[in-house]
Every structure is written in structure tokens, then in C-alpha cells.
């Protein structure tokens, strides 16, 4: 199959139904709710797997260290997180559209049940297996399972029929050519013989008549058969008695693409397209999906677009696109990728006439954050840190949120977040929407950490007084407990990853 790797060109005019060539930074559930019904032709999502993995990443262009969380607290929590988002995705998908959900072995079977309920079992079209590596370290000597080397893509259509489908082909293998195309025409063209008889006879609509002295049911009409004979494409093989059709190698489209994809290698650290993003998918994978399930100027949506591979593929193939991601860093990286690789300008005026793209809803400024309600500010700060806000915002006993590191184990039951009961290793987060956090605020947080027996915690404010910082240092010397003081500016500038470890 030929891949498109040339420079991107602008597609047609933007959609009159919805804004396209836009990257939205924020929660995709909120953004999806703003889209009209049945406005998207193709959806691809590669949401974080339920795999308890934590990534420390250096982005290629800035060497900025970032922590990417790829875990959910439990399979149930993961499905509950994804269900309302998939409901919205099903709503915005056209009846002629297609939906691809990229996942792995951790929760794919639960995801399939959820998607059957949302999209309908009759609209399930394929389980595609992508072989993402040739060998895996989890199959090393002493392990008691087979190596896990594939991902799964679940394909659903927007309706039972009429959805966009472009058949793709892979090149014929040398072995297949050598074993099947064994005949040569006088002009040197290679061909194979193909059966002409009509299976099922008259019941399948095949006609019974004589061809080159042989009476049978044939798959072509008499008129079509005479045409093929005249062209020299129908004859009796030298080692046969029944007329057959010549299939020329040069006219072969190849092998129709099947549901096991083992020809697309993953993006490793040595790959030219690698950005250092831990779950980055190869551009060829997304181009294959987009070619098969959309046409030029169709709208492609990726609601977990990470480093933007789907957007680059869509732009390369002259599709309209919409991207959504909660990470400001990811949004900036994919914007740079669109500028550098696709030569697409990030410009509001050019975007309005269909010749550029824009990024919307990047994080607020300090001035804006000072004015929002305290509880909203708390949620923003905890989520920006990669934590989970407390559901109870009054009487939180000095803890506004928690960060759960990899390796958390069951122990203490927590009534506020029962779905996380199996994870007892966590770090408390305290947030104050004040210009300068003082010593009394630190004292209260120290008491909360002692009460919950935590060895590390995070305190977020706009700034910290000298007394507050002195007490944090003294607390560590006294109790060997770490409090990390983080300012709002550090979070907005995304320079905090090295302090979260």
C-alpha cells in the first residue's frame, strides 16, 4: 500500500457546521458537549490505558521534563471515566462515519462491552490487531505468560450500512508472486489462472452456456465472456480442460488489508518521527485509518490527541480535523508539529479563510486565576499537578487533593475516594488562593500530614513568605517529612515535573 509522505497542502474550505483545524486544550467531555450532533466523519481515540504506568519524558525540542500519567485507579474507574466521553463521541459521529478506539489488553474486553452498549452491537465492524513490537521484555525467562506485543483497535460504524469505506491493499509478497504468477504471456507479462465458473449455479444468478466447447455455469454474462475472449484474457490452460481467466501481475491491486496489521513498526527512540512521547503512534498507522474510513475534506476528530499524530495524518491527507487534549504541553507540541511538518501556519486570520490553524483555551494567566472562585481554583491547581481533587470541598481536613504514584498498594480505606481504596501510597495536596502563604498555613498542613502519616506533600500558592519556607525546612529536619512548595507561576510555566518525583 502506498503511503502519503509528501508535504501537506491546504484542504478545502472549513466546515460550515463546526470549526475545524482547531486544537482545544481542556477536558474533552466539556468540549465535546459543545459540538453539534452528527458533525464528524471519522473519530480516532487513543486514551490512556489502564496500565499503571508513569512516564518521565524529555520533549525533543525543549528538553523539558514532563510526567505523563498513564493509569486509572481501577478498571471500573477507567470505564466510568470513558463512558460519558464515548456517549458524546457517538452523538457527534455521522451515520456514515466510523469510530476507532485504540487500546491494549488491560481493559479492551471491558471497553468492547461498553462500546457495544453505546454504538450498538450491529455497528461493530472489526477488532484490529496491531503488532506493535517483535519481542517484549515481559516475556523474559521466568515469566509465566506469552509476550504481549499487540494493541487492539475496535472499529464501529455510525450506522449499519452506508458508512465510508475505501478498500486498502498491501503489496503481494515475493513468495506469493513466485508461487502463483508462474505463467508468462508471449509479451513477457506474468499472470495466474483464475476460476471462471459460477458458484451456486442459477440460484446465484449465473448463466449456463458454452465457452470454448465447455458447457457450465459461468460467473460472467455471455457478452462479457466474448469480450474477455477477444482480449485474450480467457483461454484453456495448457494443463487444464476448463476455460480460465488470466490475472496479470501488473494489474493486481495487491492483497486486501486484513484485520491483523504486522507491517507497521512502532515509534521507538531511534525513529525519525519520535518526539519522546511515550505512547506516540506511527504516522503510517493513522494514515492507514484515515485513508480507509474517510475522504478528502471529511472531518477527523481525535479527542485524546497527545502529540498530534492523527492531526498531522489528517492534514497530510487533506482532511479537516479537530483535536482535543487536556495537557497544555501536548497542545503546544502538536501545534509545533503542524507548523514544522505540515507547514501549516498557526494564525487566526489565515485560519478564518481556511489556510491555517488555531489553539484554543490554553491555561489561564495568574491574573485570571486570582479572580475565580476558591473551589474552582483548588480544582484547577490539583488537576494541573496531576492529582485528584477531593470530592468534599468543605471540611477536607487540610487536604484538597491527592497524587497517587506508581506502586500504590492496598491498606487504609478512604471514604472520600472509595474507588482508590486499593492504593494507600499517596501524597496530599494543599491549595491556597492567596498572594503569600504564611507560617500558620504551613503549620496546619503539617498537622494534616502527621495525622494521615504521609512522608511527602505538595503546597500550592501564588507565593510563600520567608517564615513559611523556613518552617518547611525545619519540618523536614524535625520529622523527615517533605513539603514541596509550588507557585502558580511554576505550574503555568510547566517547570515542575522534576519536583514531583
Image (spheres, rainbow, N blue to C red):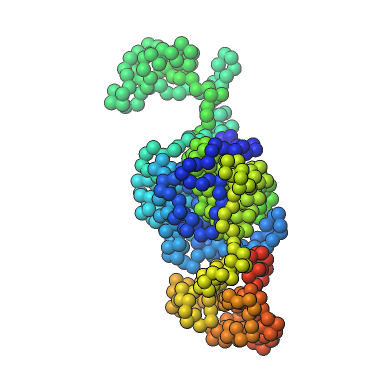
Name of the residue lying farthest toward the left: 203
Residue, x 63% and y 76% (percent of image)? Answer: 435
Q: Quadrant of the N terminus?
A: top right
Name of the residue lying farthest toward the bottom: 478
Inspect this view and state whether residue 450 appears. no
Q: Quadrant of the C terminus?
A: bottom right
Vertical placement of 409 versus 310: above or below?
Answer: below
Give the image location of residue 304, x and y in percent: 53, 54
**The quadrant where residue 9 appears:** top right
Q: Is 427 left, or right, of 120 in this rendering?
A: right
Q: Nearer the viewer, residue 279 or 207?
A: 279
Q: How many marks?
A: 0
**The quadrant where residue 159 appears:** top left
Vertical placement of 279 versus 298: above or below?
Answer: below
Residue, x 58% and y 34% (percent of image)? Answer: 2
Vertical placement of 469 versus 101: above or below?
Answer: below
Give the image location of residue 31, x and y in percent: 49, 56
Q: Nearer the viewer, residue 388 or 456?
A: 388
Residue, x 47% and y 81% (percent of image)? Answer: 395
Give the image location of residue 36, x and y in percent: 43, 49
Residue, x 48% and y 76% (percent of image)? Answer: 393
Give the image location of residue 278, x and y in percent: 61, 57
Amino acid at each position: 500500500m502506498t503511503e502519503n509522505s509528501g508535504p501537506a497542502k491546504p484542504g478545502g474550505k472549513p466546515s460550515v457546521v463546526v470549526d475545524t483545524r482547531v486544537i482545544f486544550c481542556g477536558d474533552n467531555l466539556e468540549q465535546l458537549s459543545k459540538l453539534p450532533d452528527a458533525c464528524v466523519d471519522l473519530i480516532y481515540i487513543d486514551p490512556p490505558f489502564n496500565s499503571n504506568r508513569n512516564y518521565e519524558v524529555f520533549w525533543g525540542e525543549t528538553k523539558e521534563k514532563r510526567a505523563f500519567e498513564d493509569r486509572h485507579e481501577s478498571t471500573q474507574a477507567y470505564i466510568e471515566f470513558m463512558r460519558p466521553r464515548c456517549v458524546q463521541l457517538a452523538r457527534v459521529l455521522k451515520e456514515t462515519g466510523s469510530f476507532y478506539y485504540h487500546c491494549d489488553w488491560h481493559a479492551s474486553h471491558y471497553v468492547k462491552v461498553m462500546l457495544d452498549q453505546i454504538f450498538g452491537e450491529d455497528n461493530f465492524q472489526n477488532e484490529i490487531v496491531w503488532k506493535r513490537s517483535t519481542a517484549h521484555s515481559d516475556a523474559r525467562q521466568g515469566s509465566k505468560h506469552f509476550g504481549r506485543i499487540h494493541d487492539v483497535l475496535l472499529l464501529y460504524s455510525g450506522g449499519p450500512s452506508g458508512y465510508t469505506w475505501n478498500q486498502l491493499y498491501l503489496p503481494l509478497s515475493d513468495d506469493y508472486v513466485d508461487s502463483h504468477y508462474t505463467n508468462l504471456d508471449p509479451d513477457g507479462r506474468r499472470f495466474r489462472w483464475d476460476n471462471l465458473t459460477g458458484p451456486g449455479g442459477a440460484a446465484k444468478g449465473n448463466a449456463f452456456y458454452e465457452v470454448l466447447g465447455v458447457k457450465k455455469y459461468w460467473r460472467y454474462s455471455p457478452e462479457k465472456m466474448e469480450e474477455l475472449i477477444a482480449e485474450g484474457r480467457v483461454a484453456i490452460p495448457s494443463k487444464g480442460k476448463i476455460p480460465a481467466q488470466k490475472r496479470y501481475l501488473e494489474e493486481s491491486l495487491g492483497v486486501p488489508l486484513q484485520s491483523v496489521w504486522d507491517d507497521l513498526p512502532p515509534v521507538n527512540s531511534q525513529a525519525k518521527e519520535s518526539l519522546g512521547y511515550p505512547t506516540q503512534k506511527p504516522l503510517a498507522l493513522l494514515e492507514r485509518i484515515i485513508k480507509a474510513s474517510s475522504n478528502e475534506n471529511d472531518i477527523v476528530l481525535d479527542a485524546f490527541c497527545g502529540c498530534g499524530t492523527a492531526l498531522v495524518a489528517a492534514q497530510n491527507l487533506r482532511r479537516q480535523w479537530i483535536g482535543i487534549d487536556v495537557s497544555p504541553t501536548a497542545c503546544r507540541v502538536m501545534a509545533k508539529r503542524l507548523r514544522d511538518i505540515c507547514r501549516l501556519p498557526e494564525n487566526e486570520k489565515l485560519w478564518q479563510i481556511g489556510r491555517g490553524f488555531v489553539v484554543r483555551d490554553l491555561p489561564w494567566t495568574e491574573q485570571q486565576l486570582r479572580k475565580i472562585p476558591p473551589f474552582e481554583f483548588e480544582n484547577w491547581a490539583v488537576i494541573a499537578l496531576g492529582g485528584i481533587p477531593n470530592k468534599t470541598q468543605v471540611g477536607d481536613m487540610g487536604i484538597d487533593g491527592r497524587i497517587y504514584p506508581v506502586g500504590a498498594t492496598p491498606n487504609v480505606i478512604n471514604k472520600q475516594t472509595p474507588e482508590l481504596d486499593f492504593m494507600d501510597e499517596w501524597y496530599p495536596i494543599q491549595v491556597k488562593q492567596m498572594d503569600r502563604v504564611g507560617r500558620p498555613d504551613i503549620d496546619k498542613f503539617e498537622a494534616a500530614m502527621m495525622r494521615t502519616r504521609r512522608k511527602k506533600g505538595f503546597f500550592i500558592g501564588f507565593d510563600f513568605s520567608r517564615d513559611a519556607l523556613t518552617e518547611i525546612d525545619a519540618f523536614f529536619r524535625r520529622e523527615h517529612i517533605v513539603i514541596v512548595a509550588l507557585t502558580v507561576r511554576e505550574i503555568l510555566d510547566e517547570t515542575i515535573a522534576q519536583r514531583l518525583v
